[in-house]
Amino acid sequence: MRDIVIKQGFNRPIPLDVENEDGSPFDFSDVVQIRAKIRNISREVVAELNITVDQETPGRLIIETGPTDDWKVGDHVWDVYFYLNNGDVFPMPEKGVCKWTVDERIS
């Protein structure tokens, strides 16, 4: 599991490596679309994320948060859904992949 800790105002791409249970890189070749949202501890949607598959590194996703100035300090969760080319939708487990924490901006 990876902890993602960002500061309020952070706005750079975040790489996230996803592995199968055996430690091999997850194969995203059947994924045609990824939808993701960040939610605060009250489960309110804070932001929609732009997530793409890194074509150069197997199993790697690139996460773009957009502006985070208004994100509250503390823990957040995310909902991630992979839309496959056969029409199936696969949710990424909320726990065990990564934990999001937002820290105060340093002035």
Image: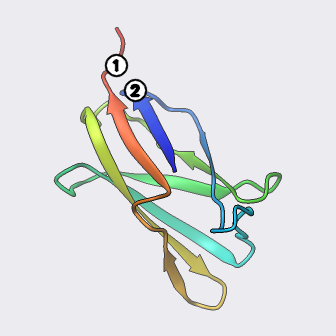
> Relative to 31, is 12 above or below?
above
Residue 105 numbered tag: 1
- Residue at position x 57%, y 55% from top? 51
Label 2 element class: loop
Residue type highlighted by circle 1: Arg
- Residue at position x 66%, y 74% from top? 31
Q: Which one is closest to the eye, mark 1 or mark 2?
A: 1
- Residue at position x 63%, y 68% from top? 21
Q: Which residue lies furthest to the front in this view?
A: 22
Residue type highlighted by circle 2: Gly
Mark 1–mark 2 CB contact (< 8 Å): yes
Binning the other alpha carbons within 10 Å of mark 2 as few (below 14), some (14 to 19) or many (20 upward) gives some
Binning the other alpha carbons within 10 Å of mark 1 as few (below 14), some (14 to 19) or many (20 upward) gives few
Residue 96 numbered tag: none
Of residue 67 and residue 19, the one placed in the foreground of this image is 19
Quadrant in the picture for residue 74:
top left
Label 1 element class: loop
Of residue 99 and residue 60, the one placed in the foreground of this image is 99
Describe residue 97's horizontal placement relative to residue 32 as left or right: left
Q: Name the residue under label 2.
A: 9
Horizontal and vertical percent position of residue 102: 34, 33
Horizontal and vertical percent position of residue 69: 33, 30
Describe residue 70's horizontal placement relative to residue 100 as left or right: left
Horizontal and vertical percent position of residue 40: 25, 49
Of residue 12 and residue 100, the one placed in the foreground of this image is 100
